[in-house]
Amino acid sequence: MSTNTFDMHGFIDTAQAFAAKSVAAIFDGEHADGALEKVDDVLATAFAIGLAASPDPNQPGHEYGIWGAALSETGLAPSALMLSAVAEVCGGVALNLHVQGLASQVIAMAGRAPKTPPARVAPAIQEEFGLPGWGTLHIPTLDAPAHVISQARREKDGYVIDGLKPFLYAMPGAEAAVVFCRVQDNWGCYLIPLDAAGVQSSAVGTRTGLRASYLSHLSLKDVRIGAEARLDDGDALPLLMRVLSLNWLGLASIGAGIARGAVKAARKYASERYQGGTMLENLPAVRMLIAGAESNMEAACALAASAAGMDPGDPGLMRACAIARLTGLQLSAEAVTDSLQVFGGYGYMEDYGMEKRLRDVTVLKSMAGTPQYLKQFIFESAEVRS
């Protein structure tokens, strides 16, 4: 399958139809974040139609789902566009598809899928309360894995793993996690069942947004796994670089989708609402708000599209994805804020869904690296490339 225009429209049409029918259905009734008990059924539909990626080669979405195994064939754009289309309706559902695809892509890239692959998997990237140090990500020979507390010790029949992986986003019912950690002076990547002895998953309490996705802190204490659980061939740095790049790009794409949904909702509201004897859309202040929101949204989409148009093997991909995540999400957040202001005080009420978009995009801005981390990475990676 190539990424010609016809194929690209097919990817987008599938995601848009899924969002309009299955995802929108969870918002029937009065639910600030949708009827969350229905999310599992929505995700089951995503697997059935091949939208959700799977590490199982026998599943429909294994190759062409979001971040599926055929990424080198399709390119990054189809997955980014599908995420954006779903996020127009619900950022949390899009995030579920995103993290499932990230973990599935790592397993596919490693080429060491287990005999009985788990149906739902999640990527455990974060170290304590930050991402791994940027040094080893673009200068592999600089030093050993930086700021990595999670460690694997080699034993006769396998490994023993200890560590903490906080803020693990996963589909409800996830069965395993793809865990990155230190193995002596190298990176290691392991597929760890979440019901293994020594694995403890503690659900995070009250959350601001993206509540359709399960969020927990993952603790690993004397977790014993067989040698076959290791996915890399001795150094997992290429796998880590791939998953970080796709994570940044996916979050930027989800943010752009949320912003697009917000702008559409603002335009619709302004075209239907009267104020001061005229339609709301005729008021100069409202026009300026919508114009600003559309400009920021289009810029966010362009940043994500630019990174998504690169070859998955391009050495500059990580930097482009970091820029899309840093600046694109800021632009998306501004677009959502301006769109919400079109509703006036009603924008903060649950009835119109705008406050949910604001909460969701705000949480996205806090994920996968602080602005300081991303800026440092962008600066350092530019120096290396020059």
Image (cartoon, grey):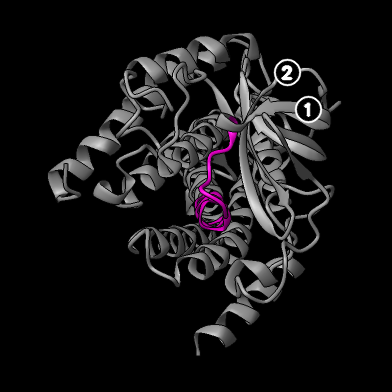
Residue 143 x %, y %: 71, 72
Q: Picture coordinates of residue 331 (x, y %)? A: 58, 61
Whether residue 3 sits left or right of residue 246 in the image: it is: left
Quadrant of the image containing the N terminus: top left
- Residue at horizontal 64 percent and vertical 81 percent from the top: 379
Boundaries of the magenta span? 229-247
Mark 1 residue type: Val
Q: Is residue 233 magenta?
A: yes
Residue 121 circle label:
none
Residue 196, label in figure: 2
Residue 343 appears at what percent x and percent y?
63, 41
The answer to whether residue 203 is seen in the rendering is yes
Q: Is residue 99 left or right of residue 133?
A: left
Amino acid bearing label 2:
Ala
Q: Nearer the viewer, residue 216 or 108?
A: 108
- In depth, the one of 20 and 214 nearer the eye is 214
Residue in the picture at 26% in, 47% down: 74
Is there CB contact under 8 Å for labels 2 and 1? yes
- Near mark 1 (Cα within 10 A), the count class, few <14, some 14-19 or many ≥20, is some
Helix, strand or loop at disc 2?
loop
Residue at image position (57%, 57%) is 237
Disc 2 versus disc 1: distance between alpha carbons?
7 Å
Q: Answer with left or right where residue 308 lies relative to residue 151.
A: left
Task: Give the number of callouts.
Answer: 2
The circle drawn on residue 223 is 1
